[in-house]
Image (cartoon, coloured by chain):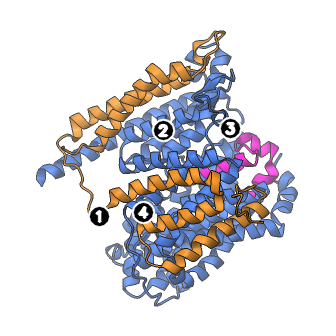
Amino acid sequence: MPRLHSSVWFGGGMIAASLLLIIFVIPHWVITPENVRILVLSPDFWPYIVAGLMGVGGIALLSQYWFMLRHMPIEEEVDRPKMGGLRTVLVAVLMVIYYVLMQYLGMVWTSVIAYVAFALIVGIPRKAATMIVAIILPIALYAFFAYAAGVPIPQADFLALP
Amino acid sequence: MSFLDFAPAAFELVAQWTSIACLFVGVVAGVIMGAVPGMSATMAVALTLPFTFALTPIQGILLLLGVYKGGIFGGSIPAILIKTPGTPASSATVLDGYPMAEKGQAGKALGIALYASCTADMISNLSLILFAGWLASFALSFGPPEFFTLILFSLTIIAGVSGDNLLKGLISAAMGLLIATVGLDLVYGTDRFTFGEPNLMGGLNFIGVLIGLFAIPEIIEYARKPRNEEEKVRELGDRHVTFAEYKKCFRSIIRGSIIGVVLGSIPGIGAAPSAFLSYSEARRKSKNKNNFGKGEIEGVAASEAGNNGVCGATLIPLLALGVPGDIITAIIIGAFMIHGLQPGPMMFATNGDIIYALFMGLILSSIFLLGVGSVAIRLFRFIADVPASLLFPGILVLCVFGVYAVNNSIFDVGVMFVTGWLGYVMLRLNVPAAPFLIAFILGPLLEDNFRQSMLMSGGTPDILFRSPITWVFWVFTAITIAALVRAGLRDRKDKMLTTEEE
């Protein structure tokens, strides 16, 4: 499959997003009262304008590509990393797990796990230092936010910090 | 009320040891974070923001301003020693700073960078003190139509100069405006894009969006492409900058400071273009122009004066008009909002003591920067040795704690992750994130002023052209778009010619 210029991806994406907003999202998810007398004061006026701008911008970007950039070579990334795509996907999965798990394990212990997991994804050249920082950093942040800032940091039932 | 009316209360605010300590800690943290390769001044200020919740407004804002100033200078240290600018603003410093380091004069380059930074910083602060109040009193006569056209102009210029493609910048700003509409409608109180989720009724959390856009994409990009951690750090070598050398550079420093002040006070331009303009002007006017790029001390001084000259000046539109000039001041406006303050002309009347206390703190920050910078230069080896494999997972954890702490909401952490991936896609597609964030912040203000104008006029758009001020901003907007389109067309033409030649 030939590679596409970033303007094509972005321009096409914006046109699709604009159409989706105008046809489906704004009519369904922007509540407009019936007593609006001046059109420009309606709650959906501004979202329609902005969605329209996105669509026009997308068309302009595609036109710019077609008339000006089409014949220019796509800049290839120099020094493409090996397994970069896999690591990116793993970070996405890590973030989902981080988000879900902190509601059950609490923020401190989930952060310890997330720190180690992230280090594993990128490779751990310093195992001992990684483990020490993975434990100390979340506990230090907990101490600051819980005691200095008075923020109730979510904790696990089974191993709650004082 | 004038400066003299507020001066005693302002002095009382800033003269407390906690305020001074916050400013000092901010400068130290900023220099360290700015000097760490891979961190930027923007990320440093964004990550510090959650730590200001527990502080009073003046302490919190002084802490952030210290990080900002320290971060901009700190970025020059790796630029000179390892040819890796800590911030984009330090890119021009590499041109002569690194060749000086190669010649064994790294200490001298860092020394003149520090002196130029502090001089420019002081001049920038003085310009802020002189002009912000004057501009604010002028802006008091602005009504909703004037503010609408001013914000529109600011957004246009920010969208235009943030990336290499005006259209991408404008679309990015439109996306920010759209995201800003999430929540309850300002006039009717009805739901907009809340999808039945109560957490969305108050709109998206600013800190979550901010950290998501500017820290998370860097973390993802590091995971995709881990960096080589064995950067070669240069020895400091000859460390002493003589008075004669400073005097030789003085004209370039003053010129660079003025360039920084002028460009910094225009929303959207920022420190990097100022540094490059200051550098090119210094080269044009210098007797040693042939030595520029080969390790000329005047080149380092000019670049650093240019990028630090914007620091105080970017606060002029922020404090006087309530319009952030760049990403860092956009973050600082967030700190004001968190503490229930709304920067703008009215703040000079309602919270003048805080404004003037900030001015006093800024002057003090230049002195702190001189001391902290001198020590940081000697300790850089330890700062640069922080391995990225330990740093980036730490930043991830810090982001999660910081964003949660704003509203004690895990939902906000989810918002941060989602906007982080949006920011990453934008990064990969070369779409600038700055217009998105600034439009997200200014969006409610833009819409509110538009709707107020329409209420005043009964729905007719003539009111948007009612005064000379609105006309000035319309004309400025048109000129900006025309200039950016012209520059873009010229750039494309040059690229096409180069491609054809190849």
Report the Cα–Cα distance between label 1 and label 3. 55 Å
Query: Could you tell me residue B145's position as x and y percent?
Result: 62, 26
The one of A20 and B119 positioned closer to us in this rendering? A20
| Residue B161 picture location, percent across and down | 43, 47
Instruction: State the residue in front, B191 or B247.
Output: B191
Q: Which comes sooner in the sequence, label 4 or label 2?
A: 2
Residue A141 pos. (x, y %): 68, 65
Q: Which residue is mark 4?
A: B222
- Picture layout, residue B337 above or below residue A119: above
Examine the residues drawn in magenta and state their main secondary structure.
Answer: helix
Q: Report how far apart the C-alphas of labels 4 and 2 lie in the structure.
A: 26 Å
What residue do we see at 34% from left, 60% from top? A84
Three-letter code for the amino acid on which mark 1 is drawn: Lys
Point out the tag, 2 or 3, that comes first from the N-terminus.
3
Q: CA distance from mark 1 to mark 2?
A: 34 Å
Amino acid at circle 4: Tyr
- The reply to whether discs 2 and 3 touch (Cβ–Cβ < 8 Å) is no
Instruction: Note the chain letter of the blue one.
Output: B
Name the quadrant of the N terminus of chain A.
top left
Q: For residue A78, what is the image quadrant?
A: bottom left
Q: Amino acid at mark 3?
A: Ala
**Quarter location, residue B401:** bottom right
Q: Which chain does tag 4 point to?
A: B
Q: The magenta stretch spans which residues?
A: B331-358
What distance separates the C-alpha of mark 4 from that of mark 3?
Answer: 44 Å
**Residue corresponding to mark 1:** A82
Disc 2: which residue: B173
Residue B143 is left or right of residue B258, and the answer is right
* Figure colour of chain A: orange
